[in-house]
Image: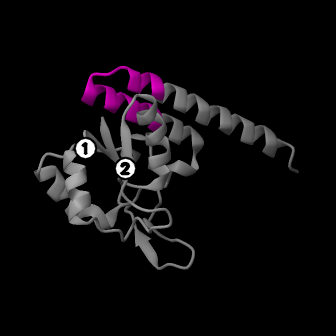
Amino acid sequence: VSVVATTSMLGDVVGQIVECGGGSVTVLMPIGTDPHDFSASSDQVAGMVNADLVVANGLGLEAGLGDSFSNAEADGANIFEVAPQLDPIELGAGMHAHEGEELDDHGDLDPHFWFDMNRMATAAQLIGAELTQVTGDENYTTCADTTASEITAAETEVRAILESVP
């Protein structure tokens, strides 16, 4: 099984799930790349088309990949956007700035779900379920449950540490 993850944040979680199930993951964007502006090369679009699944954030985070996604889907790519399925938080006017950058427009919903470890754990389960559906291999659901449990355990540990901070 071959999977493409768009960002390094997704790549870490997708990598744990897919490698546990015996597949391989390619992360589209190098670490430190601004996902708002990233454009895929022709080879990367071909990689999306040839992958069993492309895991994308969605909600406008990968705005620069819009044409690449359209071209890849037209050629048969299976793109799974996870953020819209995670009860996204409303942004109000939809405008925010990253440090040192101009305002980005993501619409009315915050695409930065990975800052919430519980949402990331749910994302892992959704990705595993999608991989199971695409491949017919239940190992991906099991691997995703393990990954989600590890994320939840880390979140519990962080909360315990922070409770001691006045």
Q: Is residue 83 visible?
A: yes
Query: Residue 125's x, y, as percent?
Result: 44, 31
The disc at residue 66 is none
* Helix, strand or loop at mark 2: strand
Tell me, yes or no, whether the two marked residues, 1 and 2, touch with CB atoms within 8 Å.
Answer: yes
Taking the image as drawn, is residue 111 in sight?
no
Secondary element at image label 1: loop
Secondary structure mostly taken by the magenta-highlighted segment of the chain: helix
Which quarter of the picture shows residue 129?
A: top left
User: Vertical placement of 33 versus 4: above or below?
Assistant: below
The residue under label 2 is which amino acid type? Thr
Q: Nearer the viewer, residue 141 or 120?
A: 141
Residue at 66% over, 38% down: 155
State the extent of the magenta-drawn residues as a range: 123-143
Q: Can you give x and y, in whole percent of width and height, for residue 37 in the image? A: 36, 71
Give the quadrant of residue 109. Answer: bottom left
Q: Residues within 10 Å of mark 1 (few under 14, many from 20)?
A: many
Q: Residue at x 39, y 67 (%)?
A: 36
Residue 26's disc number: 2
Residue 46 % position (x, y): 19, 55
**98 left or right of 94?**
right
Of the residues shown, which amino acid type is indicated by label 1?
Ala
Real-space Cα separation, disc 1 to disc 2, in angstroms = 9 Å
Is residue 64 found inside the magenta-colored segment of the image?
A: no
Callout count: 2
